[in-house]
């Protein structure tokens, strides 16, 4: 599992959110959200930005390029 998938799942769990709720927040199907978390589908940059904004973390943290979740 890549860092993005594990970080996404970790962030979702840290807020006690269901995958279905995340899909609704992103305006995508539940199945597509599941594919993001499982690495079965590339996540479009617009959705990466939305996820980083939602969780208030940097894009670098979300995709595993940094261990620092703070935005610069």
Image (spheres, helix red, strand yellow):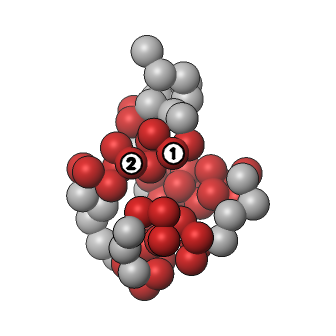
Q: Using the rendered image of the protein, determine whether residue 57 is visible from the camera's viewpoint.
A: yes
Is residue 35 in view? Answer: no
In which quadrant of the rendered view does residue 60 lie?
top left
Tell me if residue 61 comes above or below residue 11 in the rendering: above
User: Which residue does the image show at 62% across and 50% down from the upper left?
Assistant: 11
Classify mark 2: helix, strand or loop: helix
User: In the image, what residue occupies the spot 56% across and 77% down?
Assistant: 20
Residue 48, how many percent across, how many down? 35, 49
**Image coords of residue 55 (percent x, y):** 56, 43
Query: Which residue position is annotated with label 1?
Result: 54
Residue visible at 54% across and 23% down in the picture = 70
Foreground residue among 23 and 32: 23
Q: Secondary structure at mark 1?
A: helix
The residue at which mark 2 appears reads as 50
Query: Distance from label 2 to label 1 (Cα)?
Result: 6 Å
Circles 2 and 1, Cβ within 8 Å, touching? The answer is yes
Q: Label 2: few (<14), some or many (≥20) within 10 Å?
A: some
Task: Estimate how packed mark 1 is, as few (under 14), some (14 to 19) or many (20 or more) residues with alpha carbons within 10 Å.
Answer: few
Q: Is residue 1 left or right of residue 65?
A: right
């Amino acid at each position: 599992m890549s860092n993005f998938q594990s970080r996404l799942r970790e962030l979702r769990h840290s807020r006690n959110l269901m995958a279905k709720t995340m899909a609704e927040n992103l305006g995508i199907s539940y199945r597509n959200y599941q594919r993001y978390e499982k690495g079965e589908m590339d996540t479009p940059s617009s959705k990466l930005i939305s996820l980083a904004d939602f969780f208030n973390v940097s894009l670098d943290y979300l995709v595993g390029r940094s261990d620092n979740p703070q935005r610069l």
